[in-house]
Amino acid sequence: KVSLEEYSEIVSVAGIEATLESRSQMNDYFNKSIHGALSLLAPSMTDPKILDMAAVLSINHAMQKGKSIIESLVKEESSKMIDEFTRKEKKFLAGVPLSASNSRRVMSDTEDTNSESVDIQSVARVISLLEDVERGEKFDGLKLREMRESKAVAIGQLQISEHSLRFVPSIDEYCSRIVSLVKDFVSCPTSESASKASAAIEVSDIMFTFAKNGISETVRNNLFLILCDPRNLVTLVQHSSPENCPGHLTVESIATFLLTCAESGIISYHCLEKSLVEAMESHNDNFKQFVVLCMTKLASMIGEDDWTNSFVPMTRLQKLARTIR
């Protein structure tokens, strides 16, 4: 049996490891985001040494703020764990079964279990519909309507009880399936692969809901490799349909998918912008009009009416897009 002193030591060591790992990830994130933001926003003639100095100062300031938040959070969670251990130990010594609970708690646990069961079932239904399309079933208007209805139910339930996301089986498998279908299309754009990718993008909203609670680095890296490659972006746009037709990839759905990937943090705005700029500078008017569509949607997502005069995350792309209008 583990004593309170031994358990406290275990929690202390885990807290130190969590703090160090959090600091490392935080430092990497600040390095990428702050350097990227300064390189985008600073005038082109700015001395690189000045940019580096500004970045270092900003990163140091951000790290100090972040460290205090992390340390406070780790301390709070460690205290909760030790308190819980102490409470259970007292119940055990008093001869009270650890599973004992009052009727209200039992009822609450039952309701939570039922809620989690519903959440799992709703996501499973969406997965089933996606698998139908993967197997070759026609992605027509009826299937699209059914998929949208099931998706709306799943997202609504997951948002009501986000804690239950951890009970949804194979989250990464679901996200990987979406990524795989998009990858298959950019690798070999056919009407069949377009239909499957269209279905995947249609239900990708659930992936963005999962992203709030974290998805694997493998999924993030695979999406980065696909969507931050200018050639793949050009393929997506060139083989898309301007009309909203079931079974076809549309420019609207592609633009929404790209921007929501960035908005949810799965890929960075900086990387997406770089790819869009490269693709825009080397391809035809259709892609340029796609960029304008992206800017219009981006402004709408952040609550702005006119993207031409608003502050948006992708300022370099904004400047280039202004020349198209």
Image: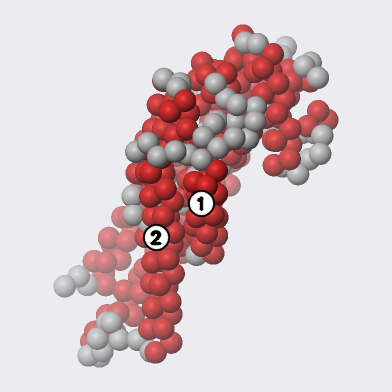
First in sequence: mark 2 vs mark 1:
2
Residue extending farthest to the left is 1
Above or below, comparing residue 101 to residue 237 in the picture: below
Above or below, comparing residue 259 to residue 85 in the picture: above
134 on left or right of 76 = left
Residue for point 64% across, 15% down: 280
Residue for point 38% across, 83% down: 106
Viewer-proximal residue, 265 or 164?
164
Above or below, comparing residue 217 to residue 100 in the picture: above
Percent position of residue 4, x then y: 26, 72
Q: Name the image quarter holding residue 33.
A: top right
Percent position of residue 96, x then y: 26, 89
Q: Which residue is mark 1?
A: 146
Asked whether residue 37 appears in the rendered view, the answer is no
Percent position of residue 137, x then y: 40, 39
Position of the N terminus, as image quadrant, is bottom left
Asked whether residue 78 appears in the rendered view, the answer is yes
Residue for point 42% across, 66% down: 118
Q: Name the image quarter holding residue 103.
A: bottom left
Q: Which residue is mark 2?
A: 120
222 on left or right of 40 = left
How crowded pointer 1 is (Cα within 10 Å; few <14, some 14-19, many 20+) is rated as some
Q: Amino acid at mark 2?
A: Ile
Label 2 element class: helix
Viewer-proximal residue, 228 or 244?
244
Q: Name the image quarter holding residue 244.
A: top right
Position of the C terminus, as image quadrant, is top right
Residue for point 59% across, 35% down: 245
58 on left or right of 117 = right
Label 1 element class: helix
Tag of residue 168: none
Above or below, comparing residue 96 to residue 317 in the picture: below
